[in-house]
Amino acid sequence: MKYQTVKGTHDILPDEVSRWRTVEEVVRRMMAAYHYGEIRTPVFEHTELFSRSIGQDTDIVGKEMYTFEDAGGRSLTLSPEGTAPVVRSYIEHGLGAKSPQVKLFYIAPMFRQENPQKGRFRQFHQFGMEALGPADAAQDVEIIALAMGIYRRLGLAGLSLRLNSVGCRVCRPGYRDVLRSFLEERGDRLCHDCRQRTQNNPLRVLDCKREECREQTRDAPLMSDHLCDECDRHFSRVRELLEQLELPYDLDGRLVRGLDYYTRTAFEVISGQLGAQDALGGGGRYDDLVEMLGGPSTPAVGFAAGMERLLLVLAQKDLVRPEPDTVDLFAVLLGARARDAGLKLLEQLRRRGIRAETDFLDRSMKAQMRAANRLAASYTVIIGEQELSKERLILKNMSEGQQEEMDLDEAVEKICRAMGSAAPKGEPSAGK
Ligand code: HAM
C-alpha cells in the first residue's frame, strides 16, 4: 500500500510553512493591537455542543461532521468551527464573571467532511475572534475593522464586505412564516433539498446555489424588510459606524450564513480570486448562544477566516513569499574525527544563538561548500585532518573571501566576535 494524505487533507511543507508563519504573525500582531487574548480549545468536543449551537438542519451538522464514539461510548466530534468551543470554554470557566467584556482569538485546524475542491478541504485552518459581553453595534464594527485590517495588512485590496441583518428571536419567526408561505407557493419548482428546507429552515433556501432555486427566489421577501425596531436601529448603527471608519460594504439581503446561531449582524468577506468558494471569511452576532448552551445571557459577536483560502489568494498575487532558507554559518567537516570536533563546536555556537548547519554525510569538500552556498552562509568553518592534527580550524568569510586559521579552543569566542553575535552566553536568541 502506498500511504498518502487522506482525501481533503494536505501537508504543509517547510517552504509553505514560512508563508503561514508570516500570515500568523500579522494575525497575532493585529489581535494584540485590538487586545484579543489567545485561547486554545481541544480539537474534539462533545457532539451535542455543535449540533445544538450550529443547528440540526445545517449542512455542517447534517452531513459534514467527523463524529465518532470513543471507548467510553461518548459521541465526540472534531471541531468543525471555533465559536461553539469558545462559548463552551467561556461558560465552563466563568470568564464572564471575571470581566464584563471578554475578547478571544484562535488559530486552529477545523474539520468538515465536504467535497474537496479549490479552497475547500476536509481539514482546514481558521483564525477567528470572538467578543463576548458588549451588545453595542460598535463591537460588531470593531470585529469587522479587525478582520478587514488583517487582510489590508497582508496587502489584499479589492475585497468585498457583504452585510446583512438576520434579525432576532423577536422578529425572525414572523419573517420565517412570510418566507415559508412564499416558498410553499413555488414548492414544485424548487430543488429537492430546498423543498425540505422550506419546512425546516426556510432562510437557508436563499443560500441555495442552484440556478432554478435562485430564479424562483429572486423576489423573495427579505429579512431586512421585517426587522423589529431594535434590530433595525442596531443595523443602522452598524452601517453608520462602518461609514465613519470608511469601511465600504455591500448590503446583501440574501446573506444568511451556514450556521444557525446568528442574530442581527451577519457578514462575509468575499474575494473575486477564488472561484466558487469565494468566502475568505464570515461572522456575525450570536446574542442567544451563550444562554442556549447554559450560560448567563450574554451578547456576542465574532468572525472566522479560512487560512488556506487566504494563502491561495496571497500566493496568486505573489504577496507573501516563502522566507529564504538560510544559516549564519556552515561547518565543512572532512572525516570522522572532524565530525566529532565539529559537532562539539556547532553545539557551542548554537547555544550562543548562531544559526549553524553542517552535514554528517561524509561528502567531498566541494559538495559541502556547495551546500554552504545554497544556505547563503555568511561564514564557513573548515575542519580537515590537517587542521585537526594542529588542533586548529579555518574560518572563512564567504562574502569577502578571506580566511583565518585559529586554535580550536579559542574558536567559539573568535567566531562569535567575528559574527558580531549579540546573544548572551548560553542563551540562544529568539527567532530562527
Ligand atoms: P464559516 O463561514 O462556516 O463560519 O467559516 C468561516 C470561513 O472558514 C469560511 O469563510 C471559509 O473561508 C473557511 N472555511 C469553511 N469551510 C472550509 C473548508 N471546508 N475548507 C476551507 N476553508 C473553509 C464559521 O466557522 C463561524 N464560526 C465564524 C464565526 C465566528 N462567527 C462568529 N464567530
Image (cartoon, grey):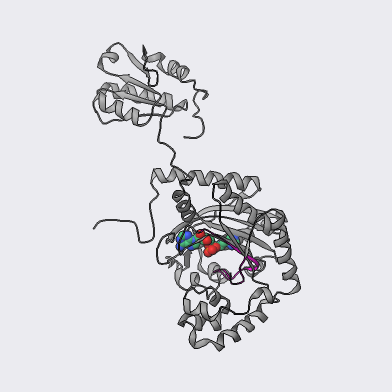
Question: Of residues 60 and 157, which is closer to you in this image?
Answer: 157
Q: Position of residue 165 (x, y in %)?
A: 65, 69
Magenta stretch encompasses residue 256? yes
Asked if 236 appears above or below 226 in the picture, the reply is above
Residue 115 visible, this orientation: yes
Q: Position of residue 33 (x, y in %)?
A: 65, 45
Asked if 350 appears above or below 121 in the picture, the reply is above
Asked if 246 appears above or below 69 in the picture, the reply is above
Magenta stretch encompasses residue 266? yes
Q: Position of residue 62 (x, y in %)?
A: 48, 74
The answer to whether residue 69 is left or right of residue 87 is left
Q: Quadrant of the N terminus?
A: bottom left
Identify the residue at image location x=64%, y=83%.
178
The answer to whether residue 112 is left or right of residue 138 is left
- In the image, the segment drawn in magenta is 251-271
Identify the residue at image location x=46%, y=20%.
419
Residue 79 visible, this orientation: no
Q: Position of residue 287 (x, y in %)?
A: 67, 66
Identify the residue at image location x=27%, y=18%.
384
Rendering quarter of residue 205 = bottom right
Question: Of residues 319 and 165, which is closer to you in this image?
Answer: 319
Question: Of residues 424 and 229, which is closer to you in this image?
Answer: 229
